[in-house]
Image (spheres, grey):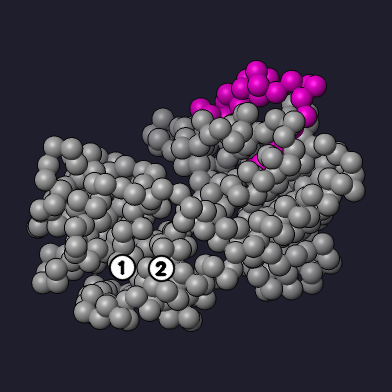
Amino acid sequence: MRNLYNILTIIANFHLKIFAPFNKKIRLGVKGRNTTYTHLNDLIKPEDKTLWFHCASLGEYEQGLPVFEGVKMMFSDHKIVLTFFSPSGYEIKKNTPLANAVVYLPLDTKKNAEKFLDLIHPSLVIFVKYEIWPNYLSEIKRLNIPSILISAVFRKEQPYFKSHSKWMLKSLEAFDHFFVQNEASKTLIESYGFNNVSVSGDTRFDRVSQQLDMNNVLNFIETFKSKNLCLVAGSTWPEDEKILIDYINSTTNDLKFIIAPHNIKKSQIEHLRSDLKDNVILYSEKESKDLSHAKILILDTIGLLSKVYNYADIAYVGGALGQTGLHNTLEPAVFGVPIIIGPNYQNFPEAIDMITQGGMLVVDNANSFKKTVDKLASNREELILKGEKNAEYVKKNRGAVIQILDYLRKYKQKTGRS
């Protein structure tokens, strides 16, 4: 099966190059991977001491960031190599001051794993959540490089637990320790003979809690919102936007709406705008138009949503009405906002928890969305109570970062590594 995996990886690489001219995301990845080794040769020298942090995409980067920052301080004389698999992470964070070198991870072949690790020769490797690349892990194990997996979630249906994938499960032996999000993950991985497991929780709770210590003031949002209740719809997809459009075009409630689409291509933004009947302003127009009289603000930009949630009275988080995957619900939760999501949330433990505790509500169509928003908008006391439940949930689940950094601090003392 390992040989088949390697063959399929090579075939995938071939097809990615063929499709690159026709798909921007694929094109960025192919082009970026072609420069990985050149960048590393320029930025990392044989005598450098290094750390390697790897994330699939932007979400995993944000998840791991509090740990990365702590480790950077702990190993202050090391250079940091940060890798991404997806363009949505790399393109946004390629200039982050966190790292000395930010590159795409080459595809998971034996040759790439050997060449990559020879170039960066890390003293420590940290992978986030789901990133299980068998050839890289096998090479890490062969070289006896200390490594950990943080904020991990294990489920029985994942490929390394299949009967035909024992070789893939064996690659997990490269990790010196697993920091998992919940007891179910710990129980599952331990049933396969791994005892180096701690339930630390999800580092995203620590990450979003940092937002409370930042300056979240956005003057243009204050002008737009004024004294109105405001619904912020974050990371929306077309299926989410359909129920939003239906509600916005028909409601008589005195609400204002901020929509932050996942896709901010001009054509997509214009299509969304054209379907909305009321006064709509784009973020890119905010300097030239009167925000105070607008009913709808569309964020045709990225990087603001975590601050915008500070102004939400109600939040709708996209991704769970379709099959694309629920986006980050902890970002609005930390500000004490009641949250509405779609029905496909089963793989998101934090959503299950917040639904159980009453701070998160589930809708599956335009009618249930209307009933839910109307109920919240007409009952300020219930709205505040549900928001407080979410804020408390985030607060009580902090602490994963402390556990992970404590482990690494003890490891450093024990081994004498610096």
13 or 169: nearer the eye? 169
Q: Position of residue 151 (x, y in %)?
A: 64, 58
Picture quadrant of residue 138: top right
Q: Amino acid at mark 2?
A: Gly
117 or 162: nearer the eye? 117
The magenta segment is 31-54
Q: Which mark is residue 203?
A: none
Q: Which mark is residue 314?
A: 1
Label 1 environment density (alpha carbons within 10 Å; few <14, some 14–19, many ≥20): many
Q: Is residue 24 left or right of residue 232?
A: right
Q: Which residue is mark 2?
A: 336
At numbered mark 1, what does the secondary structure look like: helix, strand or loop?
strand
Q: Position of residue 248 (x, y in %)?
A: 16, 65
Q: Is residue 390 above or below residue 382?
A: above
Magenta residue check for 240: no
Q: Is residue 133 above or below residue 162?
A: above
- Residue positioned 10% across, 53% down in the render: 293
At numbered mark 2, what does the secondary structure look like: helix, strand or loop?
loop
